[in-house]
Image (cartoon, helix red, strand yellow):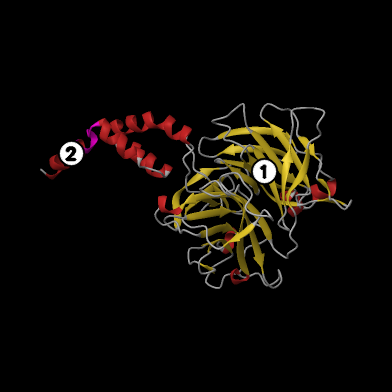
Amino acid sequence: MEDAISSTFVSGWAWLPSDLLHLIVEKLIPTSDYIRFGAVCKHWQSVALLQKQRRLKSHQQQLPMLIIPSKDNINDRRGLYSVMHGKNCGFELYVPYNNRCCGSSHGWLACVNDNFGVNLFNPFIKRTILLPPVTKVPQDIRKHAYRRDHYIKKVVLSADPSLCPNDYEVVALFDCNGTRIAHIKSGDNAWTHIDQTIRYFYGLHQIIGFDDVLYYRGQFLAASREGGVFSINISNDSTHKPHVSIVLPIVPSIDDKAYLVESSQGDLLLVRKFQSLNYSECFIENFSFKVFKLFSASGGRTGPEWIEEIESIGDDAFFMGDNQSICVSASDFPGCQPNSIYFCIDDRVGVAYEEAQGSLDMAVFNLENRRFGRRYYCLSRSQKNMPPSIWILPTMV
């Protein structure tokens, strides 16, 4: 009798009117909720599939997840850590690269192969795009494991290759400290190397090392550790040599790293991470952040000096690390902390944390009280030699 009642109950849910189901699925923001919706039954799955293309074209922002070492430290597997739930999701992705990922954009990981070519890999659809070697790497770099793994510092995409297969661009920061830049477009057979020498008004020349790069309003912008912002100028006209130019002058200061991120309102922000004391005393309490607005959503600079420090990012939450920096509206995702910066400890080594079994690999900084929250992810001691964690956007194609 109970089985019959249960069957009738499930059947009733399965045949809810399609119009009602369409209204429900339109309210689902996280991709994981959308997938669970489609798994209920064939009827719900058919409604989800009809909404799939609309969701893909809408570029609706998703909550990043942290790619972490697998439970058993298997080289070609990675786990997923959910910020919303503060725990491992319980399933693993196939990632056929047992080295550091030097980028994560639009759901694609950037990994470097033995020839220093860049492999773009989407673990959700198991698709790979092979890009040519960025440069010929000196033998002394090849022989040194750490320098080899970090020689290509960061890779960022302008768009999702799944949605724009013939219209995406890639920029790579390399030479360990980001003192060299290379650019490639979909369909190109080789990278274009870009002159990074900056000529200042008083006649001096300087090669700038970059920490971060972001595709913003049709252009790649890069940030130096000293807080300077530069545009990467690339032209289809062969008479114009690719080069970088100053957008925001360097502001002398002792900081640890700089990031560029676009807010949910379209503002361009510079986030500077500071570390007090020295690097041998690497504790979580030593870190702090400052946020500066560079350009407003209307497109104008923010002031006579083009920059202003802001005390709050409101409902936004930032996700930063070796990935392309990501911003989401926290109110769209229960469990996500507003006015906060989620960041991976990816710069050097794990940070010491007294309550952890091993090294701290991800932490959350609240801008309102200038303190770290209690939602951390810690590596176990057995995982300390595994590739560092990195944020990724869940995708579906």
Q: Residues within 10 Å of mark 2 (few under 14, many from 20)?
A: few
* Residue 155: mark: 1
Give amino acid for label 1.
Answer: Val
Q: Secondary structure at mark 1?
A: strand
Q: Nearer the viewer, mark 1 or mark 2?
A: 1
* Residue 3: mark: none
Q: Is residue 111 above or below residue 52?
A: below
Q: Quadrant of residue 106?
A: top right
Residue 139 highlighted magenta (yes or no) = no
Residue at 70% in and 63% down: 255
Q: Which residue is mark 2?
A: 7
Give amino acid for label 2.
Answer: Ser
Q: Residues within 10 Å of mark 1 (few under 14, many from 20)?
A: many
Residue at 57% in and 70% down: 353
Give the CA distance from mark 1 to mark 2: 51 Å
Q: Secondary structure at mark 2?
A: helix
Residue 15 highlighted magenta (yes or no) = yes
Residue at 47% in and 48% down: 63
Closest to the observer: 158 or 311? Answer: 311
Task: Magenta stretch: give its range.
Answer: 12-17
Q: Quadrant of the N terminus?
A: top left
Going by the image, does 25 lie left or right of 279? left
**Percent position of residue 111, x then y:** 65, 42
**Percent position of residue 334, x then y:** 39, 54
**Percent position of residue 36, x then y:** 36, 41
Q: Is residue 283 above or below residue 234?
A: below
**Percent position of residue 223, x then y:** 70, 51
